[in-house]
Amino acid sequence: MQIIHTVSELRNTLKSHNKIAFVPTMGNLHAGHIHLVELAKQYAECVVVSIFVNPLQFGPNEDLASYPRTLDADCEKLNGLASIVFAPSAAEMYPEPQTMTIKPPPIADELCGASRPGHFAGVATVVMKLFNIVQPTVAVFGKKDFQQLFIIKQLVKQFNLPIEIIASDTVREASGLAMSSRNGYLSEKERAAASQLNQALQRVVQEVKGGKCTFDAIIKTATNALNAEGWMVDYIAICDANSLQPAQENDTNLVVLGAAKLGKTRLIDNIEFQLK
Ligand code: PAF
């Protein structure tokens, strides 16, 4: 496995490959990331994993400075799995101020975007840059970041990028907690309680399937229950899984998404489900 830090070296190295599978990450790799890489390996012999904590997608009061940077440990986990780790510095990725950016679709201002203004513009911009640098045939993203996946699919579609986007299922701990680099911020007590978010979303799914209450009432009950357990719910939403618009009576392919803070840690999760 090669570890490459510059765009020019990466481009030179990739010249000899015509099929590349790409997994963009911000590092601090866990079993969820490894699952993405294993999936990528099914699509191409050459698997590139990028590790870059992208300043553009962090708000001024977010955790850019404290976001865990664990390159050596990450490379150990990828050894034998990935072909190339691309780990550029911020100066390599942004040698001059990035005054041209991707303006994502209006959905980027909803759900997570409502409390993280500019986040998805930052994600779409860095992903577009990484796609241009790596020029992959396929790229693998996790469904845990359902809204991010939706926006990346739109990016590829609307800019006619010749890249197949592969969506990978969320990897969970035995408790149901979705794997996330931010789980590392949780205290022991918080970690024991963290699966409550997934449990709340599971109850939402059951209640929607039961059909006895309105979506609004179901969301209110779930929000109140989590808040009563000490969470600070950002949102719980029942959406059409294909459009990410609020679900309507006749929609059958649904997703319930939630974001909530436990102590200082903001966690997200979602569950896709079918009606009828
Ligand atoms: O999901 C992530 O880790 C990041 O948002 C991504 C896609 C690597 C862009 O920085």
Image (cartoon, rainbow, N blue to C red):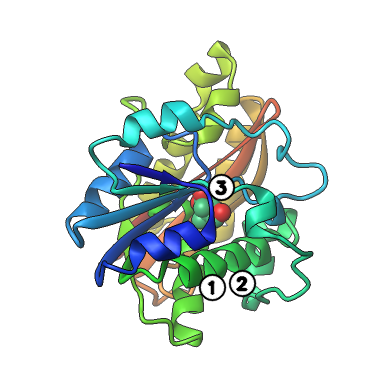
Q: Secondary structure at mark 1?
A: loop
Residue at mark 1 to residue at mark 3: CA–CA distance: 31 Å
- Asked where in the image residue 112 lies, by quadrant, the reply is bottom right
Vertical order, 255 against 162 (above or below): above
Q: Is residue 168 left or right of residue 102?
A: left
Q: Are marks 2 and 1 in contact (CB under 8 Å)?
A: yes
Q: Amino acid at mark 1?
A: Gln
Tell which tag, 2 or 1, sits nearer the viewer.
2
Which is nearer the N-term, disc 1 or disc 3?
3
Ligand 1 lies under 8 Å from the Cβ of mark 3: yes
Label annotation for residue 107: 2
In the rendered image, residue 115, in percent from the top left (x then y), is placed at: 73, 53
Say whether residue 202 is visible: yes
Residue in front for this viewpoint, 121 or 28: 28
Q: Which residue is mark 1?
A: 245
Tell which tag, 2 or 3, sits nearer the viewer.
3
For the point 44% across and 58% down, which residue is it? 10
Residue in front for this viewpoint, 128 or 186: 128
Q: Are marks 2 and 3 in contact (CB under 8 Å)?
A: no
Q: Secondary structure at mark 3?
A: loop
Q: Amino acid at mark 3?
A: Phe
Q: Which residue is mark 3?
A: 52
Please, which residue is most extreme toward the right here?
60
- Label 1 CA crowd tier, 10 Å (few <14, some 14–19, many 20+): some
Label annotation for residue 157: none
For the point 55% across and 42% down, which residue is it? 222
